[in-house]
Image: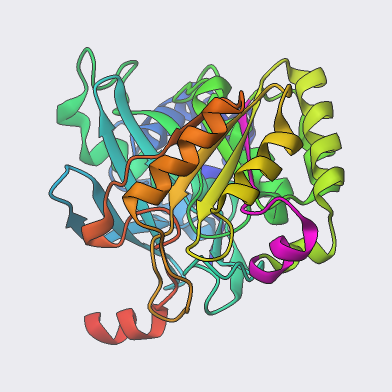
Amino acid sequence: MKKIIQDLSLLEMEELTLALGEKKFRAKQLYEGIMQGKTIDGITSLSKAFKERLKEEYENEPIKIKETFYSADGTEKFLFEFADGNLVEGVLMKYKYGYTQCVSTQVGCRMGCKFCASTLNGLIRNLTAGEILSQILIVNALHKKDIKDGAGKDGRAVTNVVLMGSGEPLDNYAETVKFLKLLTAEDGIRISARNVSLSTCGIVPKMYQLADEGFPVNLTVSLHATDDVTRAKVMPVAKAYKIQEILKACDHYFKKTGRRYYFEYTLIAGENCDEEHAQGLIELLKGKPCHVNLIRLNEVKERELKSTDDKSAYRFLGMLEKGGLSATLRRQIGVDIGGACGQLRASYIEKKEKYE
């Protein structure tokens, strides 16, 4: 596979352009075209000769939308194909304040969380920063007609980004951080770090490292239990990093960024949503600068875990609020297209056969 030109910053494109014997201003034309989601061939302001030289080293089209699925609630799920044929899924959620896109950071995942479909086939490979960014660039281009007050600004439809697709962002740390730099660059699509949420299963050393990077993203930690033994049943990473270690890393993140942190807590019937679990969560988190996002389990057919009913979910939420915790029960969106939390999967062989 060739290199991905979306991996490059404007400065790096300037260096590349000069090295290829072109004028410096051509780099800006190249960069602006790429930020608009265009292929190299699609940038009409560049000469054919320059584009041919670029394509000798860089992929003309590093990402394609293989298929789009539409939910009754307006959510869209995309099947993205990269230049090497690997596939990931992504989700676009539409709100009054703008569009939020859920992106993937890896092809597959090696974390092995029992409630998540993305980890079923293990980790295939890491995505580069440019491949992560390309998921947003291609969706921006697809929805350029929607760029208007309330649905987008500054030439982009996507206003918020969540790193909650397939993969563990902190397991692909270097490329994730590079992606954040490209995403927030003043000369790029300029999505504020405050409009970015990064979800992690709790890789403690990388949480400290991220805190020191200077990106005030919304750090979201998958908790799903109030003690290490219960958590290890559904999250193998709990064997390496204890809850108390995670809480210390979160406190460090708050001190460095001034941003409160979030915990995702998936409600699993018979496992973690009884009164004793609510009290345990209150004791664990009360007084901390955090918010709890409760998620109804989106069942995965290959797993035996079952979702709790709505009545029990709201009862659990009420107990947390009564105990003084800031908490919400996340609205279920995109369930009918397999685009809800935990549903993005890695059925690549099956999907490839469908299209071949």
Q: Identify which residue, 258 or 43, lies in the foreground.
A: 258
Magenta segment: does it hold 219?
A: yes
- Residue at (46%, 69%) from the top-left corner? 117
- Residue at (25%, 34%) from the top-left corner? 94
Position above or below: 74 against 60: above
Q: Identify which residue, 97 or 142, lies in the foreground.
A: 97
List x then y, in percent, for residue 89.
38, 60
Image position of 162 (left or right of 334): right
List x then y, in percent, for residue 131.
50, 52
**Could you say which quadrant of the image residue 87 lies in?**
bottom left
**Count of numbered marks:** 0
Magenta segment: does it hold 58?
A: no
Position above or below: 244 against 158: below
Q: Quadrant of the C terminus?
A: bottom left
Residue 282 can be seen, yes or no: yes
Q: Residue furthest front?
A: 275
List x then y, in percent, for residue 172.
69, 54
Residue numbers of the magenta segment: 217-234
Image position of 16 (left or right of 334): right
Position above or below: 297 against 87: above
- Residue at (42%, 29%) from the top-left corner? 160
Q: Residue furthest top?
A: 149
Residue 356 can be seen, yes or no: no
- Residue at (44%, 73%) from the top-left corner? 346
Image position of 89 (left or right of 165): left
Q: Which colouring convention does the figure follow?
A: rainbow
List x then y, in percent, for residue 170.
70, 50
Q: Identify which residue, 300 or 283, lies in the foreground.
A: 283
